[in-house]
Amino acid sequence: MSNEYHKLIDEDSNESNITIYEDKKESENDFNYVNTKNLIWKKRKEKKKQLLVIFISSILIILLYGLIYKINKVKSFDKSNYKDYGVMVYSYRYQHPSATENLSGTGNIGDYIQSLAAWQYLPQDIKPYFIDRDSVKLYSGPKVTMIVNGWYHLFEYNEYFSDNIRPIFVSFHIDNPNSFTNSTKKYLKKHEPIGCRDYNTQRFLEQNGINSYFSGCLTTTLDINYKLDQNERDGKIIFCDYKFGDYEPADQILKSLKDYDFSNVELTSHSVSKKISYEERFEIAKSFLKRYGKAKLVVTTKIHCALPCLAMGTPVILINKKYDFKRFEGIYELLNTIGVNHDGIFSSRIRQDQDGQVINPDDYLKFANKLKQTVRNEL
């Protein structure tokens, strides 16, 4: 009896010890679980703090860099540092980069008409510095402000401008976007928004992350200095770089116009020798504008004859055998036209009054007026 009793006591005691041990072990596991959970929570909390600090630091760094960029931009191109002015001249060096100037062949007087459009905004009592469009990167003269308008063929000497030039980008056209470099992109970004002469250039710049807008052509503002009074018109009809026989479908439409005598047409051409001085080229451009301003009607294949005529109030018709998407889109639609349109279809769109006289569309005015305001504000 005694032995059995002790045996039972021992078994109970062992079971009790086992229970106590298991309870203790379970309690320790709970404690370890809680500690582990707390540790994970703390680590997550610390991680979130670290991420928040990194995020806030990144934002502050971006804002700081943006502020520094703006300060440097304002400091570098402060108007007060660029008291002189420049206008573009044209060596056509892109055709022969190794030469200082390409003297072979002919140049385009339309380029100088574009420069005259810029020149008219500058103080009239000073002579601006002549700066070659085709080597603006190499310019080392006095610091100048220059209106940058017109046609650009990008190559090594004009992929960006000298720091001595403060540019005002309006009516800007890129001829060869496949030569667009990172250097050009960075430079244009620095001077955005960029006013574009055509929608093709605007789309290209926007696709490359450069803020741009369609400005139209600066030559539509030539009325500032070159528009004549109506009583100064001489009644002549001028054909610029066009003559009867060049394009039969256009000839037929022209000859159908009432009250226009095409038997005594004055012929002109925008081709000019590259061997004459820049001053002489400007004088020729001025004389052409005077002739266009007096005419009764101008018929041309050149956009920088047609657009100035819009500005000067001279009825004008642009003739084209092919729609030039790179150059025309946006400005072609502002003109009276005979030729192949945007859709590749031959068409004639000539506005006439009740007496059959050719009159110009006035859609260009909204762009021309905005251009005037933009340039004057920038200067």
Image (tube, rainbow, N blue to C red):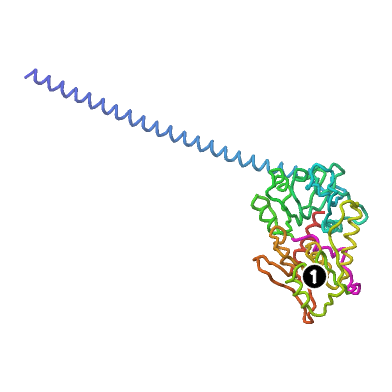
Q: Position of residue 86 (x, y in %)?
A: 86, 50
What amino acid is labelled 1 in the image? Phe
Q: Where 77 falls versus 263 (above or below)?
A: above
Q: Residue at x 86, y 64 (%)?
A: 268
Q: Position of residue 367 (x, y in %)?
A: 75, 63
**Which element is circle 1 on?**
loop
Identify the magenta region.
Answer: 216-234
Magenta stretch: includes residue 306:
no
Q: Residue at x 25, y 26 (%)?
A: 20
Q: Which residue appears farthest toward the right when viewing the image?
A: 125
Q: Residue at x 76, y 62 (%)?
A: 370
Q: Position of residue 29 (x, y in %)?
A: 33, 29
What residue is disc 1 on?
Answer: 244
Which residue is at the front of the view, 151 or 321? Answer: 321
Which residue is at the front of the view, 163 or 109? Answer: 109
Q: Which of the 4 quarters of the picture holds residue 225?
A: bottom right
Quadrant in the picture for the C terminus: bottom right
Q: Which of the 4 quarters of the picture holds residue 109?
A: bottom right
